[in-house]
Structure formats: C-alpha cells, structure tokens
Image: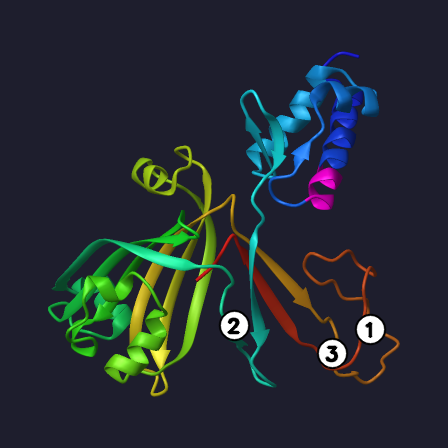
C-alpha cells in the first residue's frame, strides 16, 4: 500500500486509535510494546506505525527515550470550574499537585494608557509589574505577566510570589478580597524566549489567558495575561442543554446549538454548565 493514499491514511488512523487506547489504559511512565510487537499485533508496516507514533509524540501523549523505547507521557492535571450557584459564574477549586513560581521581573512602573484603562488608573499611576514562571512539581508550565495597582500591595516582595496563593495573600496581607474575574482564552504559539523558559520547541502550540480580577466593590485589582503550554493543558466543559419548557408551537422549527448536530441532543428543564480546565496544571 502506497503511503499517502486514502487507504494508508485510514490504516494510520486505526493504528493511532489503538495507540491511544494503550495510553488511556496505562499510567504515566508505563512502557508501550516495542515497534516490532505492535507491527505484528496490528498487522501494519513499521513506516505506518512510526507515522502514527509520531503524531502521538507530537501531541505529548507518548514519549520516546532513545535506547529504552516508548512510554505513556505525564498525565494531564485537572482543575474544575464549578458552578457558583443559580446565577452566572464559577467557583475555582484549588488545583492539584505542587505549584511554585520563579520571579523573572519585579518592578514598579507607570501604568500607561492600555493597562491604565483596564485597571481604571491614570497612565501615570504606579503599578507593580511581575513576570513569573509557574512550575508544577518543578516543571515549567506557564509564564504569567501580572499588573497590580501599586497602592494595593505596599511591601509586596518577590519572595511572596514564589509560593502560596496570590489571591489569599492579597486578602490576608493587604486586605484586598478578590470577588470576580473575567477571563478570555485564545490559541497562540510560543516565542523563542517563551520556548526557552517553558522547555518546548519554538512556535509550539500554547494557550493565552487574559484575566481582569475585581474586588467586591467592582474595583479592578489585577490584570494578568499568561501563556500556558499547549501540550500540558486542556479545557473540558460539561454542559446541560436543558431549558425551561417553552409554550408548544407546532410552527416552531428545530433550533441548532453550536457544535451539536441538528437533532443530535435535546433536553428540557433548567440548564447549568461547568467547565474543567485540564492543565497539566492550572493556577
């Protein structure tokens, strides 16, 4: 069979799914059978198997170790955003594993026009700018760029940003009670500097987070944008498609929900949504 034909592509897809099943059945660090064993088991050539393996290595589901073989990659780390109650919004449970930070920059500077608008400050007002590398179990996970009104955090030191929960620190040490945040997420790729800090190839896929946090009075207390490794972080959503029962109208035409085939899923009642953020570990 010629590589690149539809038949070869279908066979590679089948092999890829078989490999995914092996990954899902194992735990991080488990060895995957040798190429020879897999070729015999799946009835495929080595080039077909290697093409499928390459895809899973690129997706960071498998790792190759020269002279040792293939292994299940480190597990993704999960954080779930739970519905906060009957109104909009989510609670943010603590993420698992051990988080730490390494401060890259820590300086006071004028807010400038852009950051000033976000934080409701004049361009000349002082902000504290902090860039830090987030580490999970000692492994680089994300780069954060925080902007905080300087008047809110007098005496804050770089060491304060290397462990613990920043929002808890704001409350206990500075009397700032964070209440709400609006966060946007979009795909991006890492720059040369980011790649070096995160230990990934240049232009690797990543996720960019942008968040504005406010206190109970609605005052902005933090603007942060972050880059998370795309190979260690994913977002899962659990959605209820239920709605209050509308009055029946035979003239109604079926509606289409984004991402769901027409007629594929329907439900009635009161709907709620929860979103899980699978980092290999988030905030």
Q: Position of residue 270 (x, y in %)?
A: 72, 82
Distance, label 1 to label 3, CA atoms, is 15 Å
Q: Position of residue 128 (x, y in %)?
A: 19, 66
Mark 1 vs mark 3: give the one in front.
3
As displayed, is residue 192 above or below residue 235? above
Circle 2 sits on which residue?
93
Asked if the stretch drawn in magenta spans residue 86, the answer is: no
Assess disc 1: are there few (<14), some (14-19) or many (≥20) residues with their C-alpha within 10 Å of its C-alpha. few
Circle 1 sits on which residue?
252
Q: Position of residue 99 (x, y in %)?
A: 41, 59
Give the magenta range: 20-26
Nearest to N terminus: mark 1 or mark 3: 3
Numbered disc 3: secondary structure: loop
Distance, label 2 to label 3, CA atoms, is 27 Å
Of residues 114 and 207, the one drawn nearer to the viewer in this rendering: 207
Which residue shows up at 23% across the image and 60% down it?
130
Numbered disc 2: secondary structure: loop
Nearest to N terminus: mark 2 or mark 3: 2
Which residue shows up at 18% across the image and 68% down it?
127
As displayed, is residue 43 above or below residue 256? above
Instruction: Answer with the quarter of the image where residue 198 lies.
Output: top left
Circle 3 sits on which residue?
243
Of residues 110 and 106, the one drawn nearer to the viewer in this rendering: 106
Distance, label 1 to label 2, CA atoms, is 41 Å
Task: Identify the main secondary structure in magenta.
Answer: helix
As displayed, is residue 268 above or below residue 68? below
Instruction: Answer with the quarter of the image where residue 10 lies.
Output: top right
């Amino acid at each position: 069979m010629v590589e690149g034909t539809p038949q070869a592509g279908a066979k590679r897809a089948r092999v890829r799914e078989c490999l995914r099943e092996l990954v899902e059945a194992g735990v991080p660090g488990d060895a995957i059978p040798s190429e020879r064993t897999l070729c015999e088991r799946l009835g495929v050539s080595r080039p077909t198997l290697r093409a499928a393996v390459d895809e899973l290595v690129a997706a960071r589901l498998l790792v190759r170790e020269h002279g040792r073989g293939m292994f299940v990659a480190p597990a993704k780390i999960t954080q779930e955003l739970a519905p906060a109650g009957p109104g909009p919004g989510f609670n943010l449970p603590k993420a698992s594993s051990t988080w730490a930070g390494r401060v890259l920059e820590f300086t006071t500077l004028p807010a400038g026009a852009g950051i000033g608008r976000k934080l409701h400050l004049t361009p000349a007002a002082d902000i504290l700018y902090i860039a830090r590398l987030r580490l999970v179990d000692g492994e680089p996970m994300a780069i954060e760029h925080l902007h905080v009104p300087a008047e809110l955090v007098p005496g804050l030191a770089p060491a304060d940003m290397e462990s613990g929960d920043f929002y808890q620190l704001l409350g206990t040490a500075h009397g700032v009670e964070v209440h709400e945040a609006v966060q946007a997420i979009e795909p991006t790729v890492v720059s040369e500097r980011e790649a070096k800090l995160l230990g990934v190839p240049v232009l690797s896929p990543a996720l960019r987070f942008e968040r504005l946090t406010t206190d109970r009075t609605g005052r902005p207390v933090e603007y942060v944008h972050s880059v998370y490794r795309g190979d260690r972080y994913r977002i899962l959503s659990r959605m209820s498609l239920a709605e209050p029962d509308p009055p029946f109208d035979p003239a109604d035409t079926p509606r289409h929900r984004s991402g769901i085939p027409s007629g594929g899923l329907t439900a009635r009642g009161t709907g709620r949504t929860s979103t899980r953020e699978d980092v290999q570990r988030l905030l």
